[in-house]
Amino acid sequence: MSDQPTPVVGGRSLPRGAAGYAEAADVLAVQYEEVTFDEVHRDVLQFVPVVPARILDVGAGTGRDAAALAARGHTVVAVEPTPELREHAQRLHAGSGIDWVDDALPDLTLSGHPDRFDAVFVTAVWMHLDAEERRRATARIAALLVAGGRFFVNVRHGPVPEGRHMFDVSAAETAELGSAHGLHTVHCGERPDLHGRDDVRWSCLVLQADRIQ
């Protein structure tokens, strides 16, 4: 784990998990777009809604996944707390019809977006939350899903990059936490890193809401 102070950008406090992302936004804007939505989520594509759905992408970064989902005909709300990443996303995916929101887990107020979602994607975000934040975030996501809605979560395992705020979070803990909030596991797998980092691997889970919270 790396414990960092609350980052401040332009006089505004950001979530601790955003530490290091503003400074690296230009590099990340290239790195994130080097792989596709289908490559990142290849093992869970069968669980992605086929008919037009309402989807939330939390920690959307440069908008790669949000844009791919919008191109499939979904209505997409994309959450990204780091202004520098949002600016890249809105430039790279201009005209995608994505509704961008400045917000973050664990509380995720989503002001102006009262409706529930058919799917929530949280990619490369979960390990930035501490145990209490993960509990609150799971409860919030469960409350945002319609009955039968699915929570897609990718969790990074490996060395913590310099300047980042991360925790070691297991797939088993993530599934157990979901179960405690009415989300049962329909998929749990692991894949190597797509950027060639041999010491990094990813857990990929899909949790489904049995009922409305």
Image (tube, helix red, strand yellow):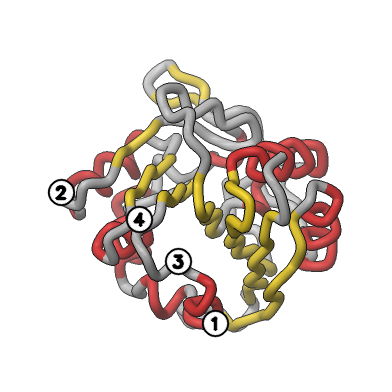
Amino acid carrying label 1: it is Asp
Task: Name which of mark 3 and mark 2 comes first in the sequence.
Answer: 3
Amino acid carrying label 3: it is Pro
Q: Which mark is residue 193?
A: none
Task: Name which of mark 1 and mark 4 comes first in the sequence.
Answer: 1
From mark 3 to mark 2, how far is it between C-alphas?
23 Å
Residue in front for this viewpoint, 63 or 119? 119
> Mark 1 sits on what residue?
43
Q: Which mark is residue 94?
A: 2
Dots 1, 3 in contact, CB < 8 A: no
Vertical relation: 36 (above or below) 43: above
> Mark 4 sits on what residue?
66
From mark 3 to mark 4, how far is it between C-alphas?
14 Å
Tag 1: Cα neighbours inside 10 Å, few (<14), some, or many (≥20)?
some
Task: Name which of mark 1 and mark 3 comes first in the sequence.
Answer: 1
Residue at image x 52%, y 40%?
116
Task: Name which of mark 3 and mark 4 comes first in the sequence.
Answer: 3
Residue 140 position in % (x across, y down) = 67, 37
Q: Helix, strand, or loop for circle 4?
A: helix
Task: Name which of mark 1 and mark 2 comes first in the sequence.
Answer: 1
Dots 3, 2 in contact, CB < 8 A: no
Residue at image x 58%, y 55%?
149
> Mark 3 sits on what residue?
49
